Structure formats: C-alpha cells, structure tokens
Amino acid sequence: MVSFRLHLARLTFLVLTLAGFNAAAATADEKFISDWLDTQSRLKTWTAGFVQTRSLKALTEPLVATGKVFFASPNHFRWELGTPAETIAIRTDSDLWVVYPNLNRAEKYSMTGSLGPWKDALALLEAGFPRSQAELNQKFKLLEQSEKNGKVRLRLQPKSSQARKMMPEMLLEIGAGNFQLEATELLFADGSRLRNDFMNGIQNPVLDPKTFAAPSDPALKIVEPLKK
C-alpha cells in the first residue's frame, strides 16, 4: 500500500506548485515573475492529466503511472492516480482523504490533528494561493532559476528545517511564454525523486463541487491511521 509520505508528496506538489512557489522566485526575474503572478491571480480552478515518475535507489527502472488532477482555489484538490484510478486523494475543508477503490478502503487524516514530523510539510501544503508575497517568501528559499527549451526552471528549498528533513529540495518548470505549469519534481532526503509532467492543462474550467467532496460510498471501510 502506498505510504502516507508518498500521499503527502503528491498532494504537496499540487498546492505548492500552483500557489506557493511564485513568491519564492520574485527576485530572480522581475518581468517573468510579475507576469506569472498576474496569471496566478486569475487561476481559480485547474485540471490536467499527468505522467508520474518515481525514481528509487532500490530500483533499476523508475515506476511510471498516469492520472488526472483537479484543483479549486484556495486549497481543494483531487488527485487520481492510475487509469482507472487505483488511488484517489481528496483535500476537503478539514480533512485529507486517501481512497483505494479496488480495496474498498478509505484513509482519513485530519488537517487539524497531530501529524508528527509532517506538521511543517502540511503547513506548506496548506499555504494555498498567496495572500501576500511576503507570506510566501517566509516559506521558501530560491536556490536557482534557469531557462531551457522554453521552460523556466525553479529550484527551491523549504525554509522549515522539519520540512527539509523530508523534502530538502523542490523543482518547478513553467512555460516561459504561457506561464503554464509544465512539471514538478520533489527530492526526498533518501535520494528518491517523484516527478509529475502535466499535459492538457485547462485553466478555470467549471468543476462539479462533488469533485472535492469526502467519499460517501457505504461499501468503503474508513480508517484513521494517525488517530490515537
């Protein structure tokens, strides 16, 4: 079964890359960042397909899967991995749900409960769309910005020491001309990597609110792994 660490990594990609990374790079290329921020300010919903690649030291070949993601400002999202979906992660107002349809199982994680060493990582996840540039600058340090093949690449580091113990570095690729999210990559402390390459992204589609609702299938066995 997929670990809680991996769930949070996947979910963190969505919120951080759609929202939090922009302020961190504000001093690197003022014109690009200004235009990107303007585009971000108008982003209320977003959906895209993706190819996910997991690179682990223990494996000679990476693990590759496809899926689809849905996002609604400020912090609701739905992450479907596999076609048909084998894992579904949903962020509601108060909880994080991880659903395994094939196993009739759903895991519930309270966003207000204790998550141990993941507390700071979830704080990053909860950043949502920036309320101010200063607020986001408090969370990230820009290590490098470069451009290649029409993509701007940002290499960032969480400022939280606890978050860095889990995720010391994050990468973001943005279209240089259209400011579209192209790819994200997260480096774990153990050297493993998790990359998402997005495709067919649509900005501000009309999404059914049920997309972000907690699972209601009575056949699901609901467990709370972190509840004492």
Image (cartoon, rainbow, N blue to C red):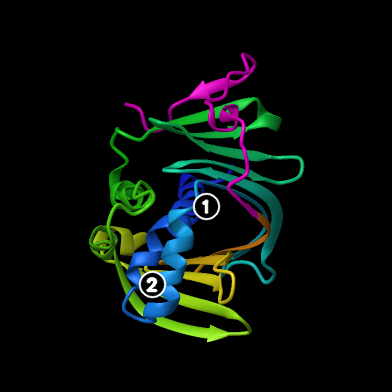
Vertical relation: 200 (above or below) 79: below
Query: Which residue does the image show at 62% across and 44% down from the upper left?
Result: 205
Tell me the number on the disc at residue 48.
none
Q: Position of residue 211 (x, y in %)?
A: 60, 32
Mark 1 — residue?
A: 10
Q: Position of residue 51 (x, y in %)?
A: 68, 59
Mark 2 — residue?
A: 156
Task: Say which quadrant the N terminus sits in.
Answer: top right
Q: Marks 1/2: CA distance?
A: 17 Å
Look at the numbered disc 1 and give the secondary structure of its residue.
Answer: helix
Magenta segment includes 208: yes
Prevailing secondary structure of the magenta residues: loop
Quarter occupied by residue 162: bottom left
Kind of residue indicated by mark 1: Arg
Look at the numbered disc 2 and give the secondary structure of its residue.
Answer: strand
Q: Position of residue 105 (x, y in %)?
A: 60, 27
Residue 193, visible in the rendered structure: no
